Amino acid sequence: MENYLNENFGDVKAKNSSEEALQRWRKLCWLVKNRKRRFRFTANLSKRNEAEAIRRSNQEKFRVAVLVSQAALQFIHGLNLTSEYTVPEEVKAVGFEICADELGSVVEGRDVKKLKIHGGVEGIASKVATSITNGIPISEELLSKRIEIYGINKFTESPVKGFWTFVWEALQDMTLMILAVCAFISLVVGIAMEGWPKGSHDGLGIVASILLVVFVTATSDYRQSLQFKDLDREKKKITVQVTRDGCRQKISIYDLLPGDIVHLSIGDQVPADGIFISGFSVIVNESSLTGESEPVNVNSQNPFLLSGTKVQDGSCKMLVTTVGMRTQWGKLMATLSEGGDDETPLQVKLNGVATIIGKIGLFFALVTFAVLVQGLFTRKLQEGSQWTWSGDEAMEILEFFAVAVTIVVVAVPEGLPLAVTLSLAFAMKKMMNDKALVRHLAACETMGSATTICSDKTGTLTTNHMTVVKACICGKTKEVGSPKEASNFCSEIPDSALRILLQSIFNNTGGEVVKNKDDKNEILGTPTETAILEFGLQLGGEFQAERKACDIVKVEPFNSVKKRMGVVLELPEGGFRVHCKGASEIILAACDKVIDSKGEVVTLDKAYVKNLEKTIEQFANEALRTLCLAYMEIESEFSAESPIPTKGYTCIGIVGIKDPVRPGVRESVAICRSAGITVRMVTGDNINTAKAIARECGILTDNGLAIEGPVFREKSEDELREIIPKIQVMARSSPLDKHTLVKHLRTTFEEVVAVTGDGTNDAPALHEADIGLAMGIAGTEVAKESADVIILDDNFSTIVTVAKWGRSVYVNIQKFVQFQLTVNVVALIVNFSSACLTGNAPLTAVQLLWVNMIMDTLGALALATEPPNNDLMKRMPVGRKGNFISNVMWRNVLGQSSYQFVIIWYLQTRGKAAFQLDGPNSDLILNTLIFNSFVFCQNPADCAKATMSKMPTLPLSASQLFLVFNEISSREMEKINVFKGILKNYVFVAVISCTVIFQIIIIEFLGMFANTHPLSLKQWIVSVFFGFLGMPIAAAVKMIPVESN
């Protein structure tokens, strides 16, 4: 079976599956009872094609708009343009001078002419009643007027399905429809022959059972949909920095309004259409909107920013002009939201399993119907009455048809693929509480197979709460961790050197010091920038004063490839000064001068270089992150188009930043090692810092290899094959190094790789990995969008929790599949053999509908929602080549099936003698006992319906007891103790309790409708005993050694 599944259903991957693969498996699944329910959680390929068509249309539209705007620029240069635009009265009445449609047409059409007519960005700002420095006023009345005219920043979503929609979808089950027709015919014929109410019992029993199945199924599906809605809401919690009423603050992107001043930096997604106000080196990737991969430079000449595009480099301020469904991104997202997530590999495989079993069941159903009808015709021929037919005989044929239909219901386990979704939804909801947001369903199950985790250092293994604790300035190395130490250090630095240092700190930064609502200083920026800015404030510097003292000519933001950032300042006294900071050894290598202890600039000789290198190494060995600050004077003119120099700098000093290891990381790494998961640290830091942290975390062992990115990328393919298995630490790595490592681990070594990332440049590695893990706090929006899971607290221990949940999902689905296969095998063989040998089936339609509900919905609830335990992290990972339906599962299925078949067959053939049953109700009591035993012995799977005749109910009793105890046995596939932690799983206990209670009600009180007969105490004890006996049998079977695959 595994080979068949891999061959026909194995093309669908955990991510980036082709449309051809998605189409192929759908075509193979032709035997489906309820298409709406079966394919509910699969991708809507037609909607995706619509979205792609919108992208192509946008690409053409924007290409034309660019050409038109370029021509317009040449044409309108020097002309006085007049506007024919008339402001609508309702817009004027609330204080605005431009309507939403006119405003939207400026950016969407990239209309330079219109922009100039409206007075450029300042004119637009004035017309939407905002200030490009202070933003919009925040009074409730003004905000509501703005919303009334311009709308809100939300796109149209498909309405939430109500409970009755799920009821209607559950009723679309073809087999239930056929049974409903059978019930109607049974009602008509029964009432006509036996009168009301006696003749209606069979038909009403089936109708009641159908309704029960429908409502239980709908309730389960409805709750599942609510869980997914909650998760969708969490995914959309994206914040952006804006200036409102003069205060810099974070707000949800859905609260943005036209007129807002938004601050964008590298890695951000543009949250609405807008116009560039000011900024440096802004490059935007518009591929998500247009499909065009070539990035676009945004500046005062090309000031248009489109919603949904991504800032690839630089930073800027933007004036929001258009929001929500008025943007092209809003229209695209409205279509994309209906496209849905790709189905997961497990969902597809289990659809394959359901199809295989369904085909077998259909064959058994046809043969069973043929055998039963042939038996009736043979009897009629022997009696010589083949030409005369009574109503009872017509009812008998109807019952035979119902038996065949119920065998199909039993054999097409619709619950298998849906159990995956149920388990994933349950796990995703619980993982949210554990600070992990799963963006793609498949990541949940793939993480359970992970064999390698490539983790960042900063913020993942460490706390990301950074402080400058040591500094080497003017040749003096001091502790500066407290304000007092920083103040003392400040007094020892010459004034000239201090001025240069503060100018470097406050101008060459991606962060800001702003006043919050309480009029207190608040530092915004990455933890590294925050630490350095805080150090500058402790030295007595003032951010705003330093910024106002000089004009910034050019900014090169930090780049993880160059590992440096720079800024060019135009000095008030004339001339230009370049400030640079970054990786200590890289910046130091670019320096040829240094500020000495007297504050004078001197040549950087070999002895001084050696001393500084020794300081860097000392800081790094203390697990400090080191940064070097440098500057350069430029006497000649400097153009913003010119590149920032890379050599000839004067070294200002080196700072050591402390970022403590997170509590519990060492224990989490040890758990990963015992679980067969290799943890590798991939960082941009100095190799000595990386090794010190890796040893503290337990990642770097005596046999492990620590390597630098530049060395790694020089290796040949043969050398890489030799060293990659040994690599535990990669320092000074570039995004390309990380991507190369991940690609080799996945392809050459066939590892299942999880990768963490937070920056824009991590997106390729996150995309390449089997599971991309983005950081929720430090991560950029680009990284989060490329990731499969967002670690909300940036904590490595949370990654281990995700792995544990992933394994739990995988194992839970295996348990449910084992449970379903057992019931399917027994139900098929029992009904088929009984029909062939005795001329009737032991389980009626009503009884099998009840069993079917236990198997499908209740079984999935009980087994697919089992919470993880620590033992899961003590076994080896499944990896890339593991079989889903393992030999262990087949052993358990065959062992349990054999036992149950023997018991039920014994009850059918010897039950009357064993229980001394005689009289008119003997057959009914016997079949009740079989039904009861079967329920208590089985696990909840797809065992559905049989005949509408008054069959014996002893088998029914036995069968239901099999279900209950087999369900308990299925909690563990290899361990003997199946009761461990059972009381912690409230869902499991509730399902078992409900099953037992309803079983008692069906047997004792619903005999007329369910074709059962009340059992004596002795018969109940025997039923429970037969069910319970399945547990030691299951334990004995587990002791039979088999290979895993």
Image: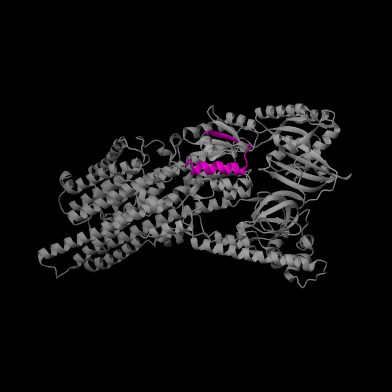
The image position of residue 418, as x and y in percent, is 42, 53
Depth check: give the residue in front, 244 or 321.
321
From this viewpoint, is residue 609 visible?
Answer: yes
Q: In which quarter of the image is residue 166?
A: bottom left
Range of residues picked out in magenta: 726-750
Judge whether 193 appears above or below 955 on screen: below
* Residue 924 covered by magenta stretch: no
Q: Nearer the viewer, residue 184 or 978?
A: 978
Left or right: 592 in relation to 755:
right
Q: Quadrant of the C terminus?
A: top left
Q: Residue 665 location in percent, x, y?
A: 56, 33
Judge left or right: residue 31 versus residue 780: left
Image coloring type: one colour
Depicted 949 relative to depicted 315: above or below: below
Reply yes or no: does residue 734 show up in magenta: yes
**Residue at 36% across / 35% down in the picture?**
975
